[in-house]
Image (cartoon, helix red, strand yellow):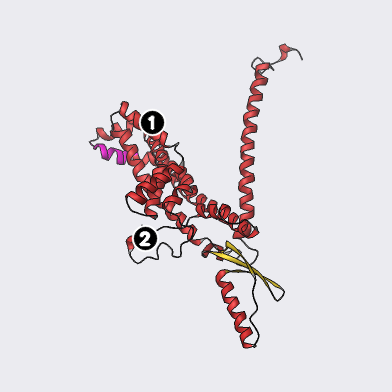
Amino acid sequence: MSDQSQHLFSSRPSARRRAESGVAWIFRLATYIILLAGVVVFGDIVIKGSRTVFQSEFPFINVAFLTEAPKSLYVFEHEGEHYEMADDDFRDFRESVEAQALAAGEPAPELKAKTYVYSAGGIFPNIVGTILLVVGSMTIALVLGVASAIYLNEYAKQGAWVRFIRLAILNLAGVPSIVFGLFGFGMFVIFFGWNVSLMAGWFTLAFMVLPVVITASEESLKAVPMGFREGSLALGATKWQTIRKAVLPYATPGILTSSILGIARVAGETAPIMFTAAYVVRDKLPWQVEQAMDFFFQGVMALPYHIYVVSSKIPQNEYSERVQYGTAFVFLAIVALIATSSIILRNRLRARYRW
């Protein structure tokens, strides 16, 4: 076929088109590599973690892992059989063996057991602490962040000072989490005297995620057409009535998007809660307090800090590995559940408020 038979608008090969195609394939390859890395990492956690969380026999879920506190594991041999027991079960077993030997008039056998810290029991206190930290800190961050966004976008006179505030907020978004942890330790733990507690952890994590919430909320407010405000004001509504009735409902889906981003960051932070809220071990659950106010001024156990401890602060072995992957699996599931709830709520509001 000659060149005259080709369509007038058909693409013709050229060095420029080949270069563009090559660049597109580089971008595509980079995207696939990132996706593959994510699949490998998360797939490894899901596969190995599910072996700890799930089991082949009824009820098919490792209930003890999800409902008990972390314990030490004792591994030993007795009368030719291999045993793996948590510390409390081991004590009961040893007492029963000693009682049987005493009844038979024989010396009590010595049970030589190897001890593995945090390799038995479960992570229930860590689950509770993580949920409390995420819900409390995001509540504070959303209240303060949305209020700041409303002021900056709706009330503040736009000028150099407001631009400086926005620049400062953007700079805060890049501050390392360890700095926020030290700030929370100095401000809330020491200066305010809250000690290592839920309250100190809530405000530290809330301040850490505030830049994201403020920026996303302000962009959501800007996306609402000015005609909504003008129409409301023309009908005699006050400034606050206009914001509350004609602006916030339509900006809420975008604000919830900021909460999803905030949850992902808050839930996974270890350094801030290590300074302000988390304990390695705590005997009581948060609600096991004498007075109601004590609930807010007590430390908790948390999943990210527990993963840090079992991964770096104790000797590594096959038993601790099970706890590491099981904890990471549950942690990802909780974060995904909270984020999914926010996404569902956002989509419902987005379908309800359209313009």
Task: Judge whether 56 appears above or below 3 on screen.
Answer: below
Q: Is residue 20 left or right of residue 283?
A: right
Disc 2 marks which amino acid?
Phe
Mark 1: which amino acid? Leu
Whether label 1 touches label 2, CB < 8 Å: no
Q: Nearer the viewer, residue 331 or 121?
A: 121
Q: Which residues are magenta?
A: 236-247
Viewer-closest of 170 and 46: 170
Distance in Å between CA atoms under marks 1 and 2: 37 Å
Instruction: Give left or right: position of 228 versus 354.
Output: left
Q: Is residue 350 visible?
A: no
Q: Which residue lies under the disc numbered 1?
A: 167
**Looking at the picture, does residue 157 appear above or below residue 270?**
above
Instruction: Give the residue displayed 64% in from the left and 49% down from the top.
Output: 44
Q: Position of residue 285 (x, y in %)?
A: 43, 63
Tell whether position 276 is magenta: no
Q: To which residue does mark 2 refer?
A: 295
Quadrant for the N terminus in the image = top right
Mark on residue 315? none
How packed mark 1 is, by other alpha carbons closer than 10 Å (few <14, some 14-19, many 20 or more), is few
